[in-house]
Amino acid sequence: MSALEPRPPVSKAEYVYNTLLDDIRNARIPGGTALRAGEVARRLGVSVTPVREALRRLEKDHLIRYEAHHGATVVDLGEEALAEYYGLRAVVEGLGARLAAARVTAEELAELRELHAAMVEDAARGRGDRLGEQSLRFHLRIVDIGGPAFLGAHARAVRNSVPVPAEASLWLARDQVQAQLDAHEAILEALAAGDGDAAERVMIEHVRHAGAFRARTT
């Protein structure tokens, strides 16, 4: 679809779902928060029906659960669930890096290097608020290259299942940024060399480090 073509209208249920999904993923609605359909409907200017439909979708996404006498509540992950999440991410994204090392093209490698260079520049200019989203793009692009048929979709499903509070992003911690940029650089070097073992090892260590950081900040 070109930029000049009109976009199809979004249904009210889709609008509510996308709004709540973004709020939960970015922890504007933190874990443990009760989501009452009437209150959400008033805030978003819609009726209760599309809100209920959106809540059912969020329940299927495992982002909310229904509790007796509380209704819909945003899932608040404990230590074991977070460890499982980052462990799963490490496996999926590590495999993606291994596979990418065997199939990455010069053009794709240049794209990844350009994204990494933008992150380095933003870090140098103190624009830490941009780094988390750029890192997400970096990781998912590598997995897409390595596993375009299935792995990329799995990586997104894992990522989308757990919101990351702003204060838990290691990209906002200045003492963490350089080490993570160095890890990205090492991954790029492994991809360029076609070294799947190294690409997978560094990616796994990189993701596990993020998990350990989050465990300390929650």
Image: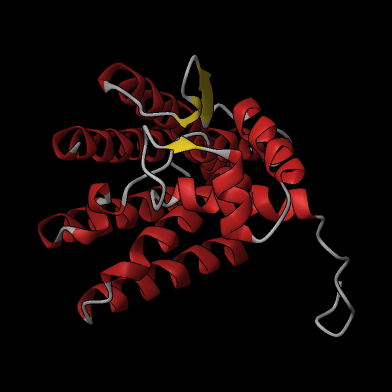
Q: Which quarter shows the C terminus? A: top left
Q: How many marks?
A: 0
Residue 104 visible in this rendered orientation of the protein: no
Please state which of residues 171 and 150 is positioned toward the viewer in this rendering: 171
Furthest residue to the left?
A: 175
> Which residue sits at x=50%, y=57%?
137
Please state which of residues 67 and 115 is positioned toward the viewer in this rendering: 67
Please state which of residues 30 and 68 is positioned toward the viewer in this rendering: 68
Residue 118 visible in this rendered orientation of the protein: yes
Furthest residue to the bottom?
A: 4
Q: Which quarter shows the N terminus? A: bottom right
How far across and down, in percent of the image, does residue 29 sit? Answer: 41, 47
Q: Is residue 101 left or right of residue 175?
A: right
Q: Is residue 170 left or right of residue 175?
A: right
Q: What is the quadrant of residue 153 in the picture?
A: top right
Q: What is the quadrant of residue 198 in the picture?
A: top left
How far across and down, in percent of the image, does residue 27 sit? Answer: 38, 48
> Which residue sits at x=61%, y=27%?
59
> Which residue sits at x=68%, y=43%?
51
Q: What is the quadrant of residue 105 in the picture?
A: bottom right
How far across and down, in percent of the image, does residue 191 sit? Answer: 46, 49
> Which residue sits at x=69%, y=42%?
148
